[in-house]
Image (cartoon, helix red, strand yellow):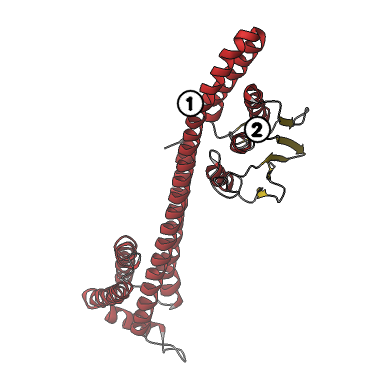
Amino acid sequence: MSEPSTHKFRKSISVLVLIHILIWTVIAVVLFIYQPLSWNIAIPIQLWIKQAIVLVLLIISYYVNAYVFVPRFLLQNHVRKFFILLILMVGTVIFISSLVDPWLHIPQLMDKAFHHRGPPRPGEHGHNRDFSVLMLTMTSLVLGISTSVTAIQKWQTDQRLRQELEQEKTTSELSFLKAQINPHFFFNTLNNIYALTVVDVEASREAIHKLSRMMRYLLYETQQDTTFLNKEIGFIKDYIELMKLRLTDRVTLRFTYPENLNDEQIAPMLFLPFVENAFKHGISSTDPSNITIVITQEDSQLSMNVSNTVFNDPQIQVEGDSGIGLNNTRRRLDLIYPNQHTLSIERTADNQYNVKLTLNLA
């Protein structure tokens, strides 16, 4: 478990413990302070013993419901059995509580205490009826709280697990994305560099340097959750420069980005799938083609526009998983930048494939 996950887990445990302490504090106040003192009589010690027994019964009913009834019946869609068990639990608590009265001689002691206080006030109920009503109310309330808290915890746990699984999935897909780039791209690039060494040694050295920077970026910078924007753009720049080695004069390529960057933190490998897709599907060996990649930055808003020619290839689908990692990138954007990004992909009537990605990095 990572350090942030451990911190979140400990924090959630602390909150859970605090909630339970608060629940039992409120119930104990009702049992030991509010109800006995509202009678305005001298409370016999046997009543305090009974209230302690009642508190124990309520605690047992709470956790039996939370750890047995709710997970095994309610959350398994056995609703009828669940409510039958709740009714039996309420009846059991009231029945055991009623057995405590004769055992501790509560009725006689309470009658004596009320007799010493004086005649009953107008509209005042007998204490036995008060006990029954209180037990029914308290037991029902405790079971209701137990059911609600347990159901909410289960929902939060399931949601957290779904998010963790989704993050793990996108992380593994990012690793797969890097592995997918390496063999095909690096093999072709090395062949191009090898051919370049025959005609231009200096250019081949520069290409090898760019390739080594890309490999270093893939190995080290993408292991973290974020990287610096200038490094991400530098990787894209090196990628484009190496792709130029196999382009013909029939390809028009334009790549622009801000010279003076506000070097923000950004998730790595967000731009590459769109750029790679443009080179994969936007180049023809016979027809004129164009690729335009424009990255702009205004305050904390970062935008990337990629436009390329689309040839009549039935395998190219605007919303499909063309290129590498488009679906993966969509999921990463939804997880990392929820409500902080816009992504539009369209194919125009004049056979252009346009991608526009906008990120709010504030």
- Looking at the image, residue 145 lies above or below residue 216: below
Mark found first going from the N terminus, 1 or 2 = 1
Judged left or right of residue 212, residue 43 is: left
Q: Nearer the viewer, residue 41 or 330?
A: 330
Residue 9, percent across and down? 44, 45
Residue 95, percent across and down? 25, 77
Looking at the figure, which quarter contains the C terminus?
A: top right
Query: Which residue position is annotated with label 1?
Result: 183
Count residues near mark 1 (Cα–Cα under 10 Å), then give few for <14, some for 14-19, many for 20+: few
Residue 17, percent across and down? 43, 53
Count residues near mark 2 (Cα–Cα under 10 Å), then give few for <14, some for 14-19, many for 20+: few
Q: Quadrant of residue 269?
A: top right
Query: Which residue position is annotated with label 2?
Result: 286
Residue 200, percent across and down? 66, 9
**In the image, what residue type sits under mark 1?**
Pro
Q: Nearer the viewer, residue 39 or 92?
A: 92
Front: mark 1 or 2:
2
Judged left or right of residue 322, residue 155 is: left
**In the image, what residue type sits under mark 2?**
Thr
Q: Nearer the viewer, residue 322 or 42?
A: 322
What whole-number distance in Å separates the C-alpha atoms at marks 1 and 2? 26 Å
The secondary structure type at the circle numbered 1 is helix
Judged left or right of residue 5, residue 282 is: right
Please report the residue visible at 33 percent of the width from the left and 73 percent of the height from the top. Answer: 79
Please report the residue visible at 62 percent of the width from the left and 12 percent of the height from the top. Answer: 204
Q: Quadrant of residue 332?
A: top right
Q: Nearer the viewer, residue 46 or 251?
A: 251
